Image: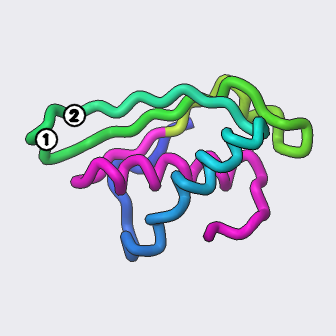
Amino acid sequence: MSAPSHLTGDQLTLNRYFMELHNLKQRGEVEYKEDIVGPPDARSWTCYFTIVSLHPKFKQEAITQTFWVSAEQKQAARDGAARLILLNIGYNGPVH
């Protein structure tokens, strides 16, 4: 699956998606590999997440898929990619 090359909309709404994905990982409900590309002074960062395993309550077709987003800020790229995962696995919980 390909992600948009940049994020649109209010960046502030994205600031908790990675934390929610991290919490799912801590509970053993999702396992993923993460790779962030960009030098320290990068004008653009790309974050890739590949789903390794999922709890059966989530959409299993997402396993082995890679989701990515590029953004001007490292955290925005990370949150955007995490948001794509949550949407694609069928996560319906609150994003705190």
The residue labelled by disc 2 is: 38
- Which element is circle 1 on? loop
Would you say 19 lies left or right of 51 here? left
Which color scheme does this rendered protein use?
rainbow
Neighbour class for label 2 at 10 Å: few (<14), some, many (≥20)? some
Neighbour class for label 1 at 10 Å: few (<14), some, many (≥20)? few
Residue 44 at what x, y percent from top left?
Answer: 20, 45
Image quarter where the N terminus lies is: top right
The residue labelled by disc 1 is: 42
Would you say 85 lies left or right of 79 here? right
- Which mark identifies residue 50? none
Residue 73 at what x, y percent from top left?
Answer: 25, 54
Give yes or no for residue 8 being in the magenta stretch. no
Eyeballing the image, is 88 above or below 11? above
Which segment did they paint magenta?
68-96
Q: What is the three-letter code of the residue carrying label 1? A: Ala
At 21% across and 34% down in the image, what residue appears? Answer: 38
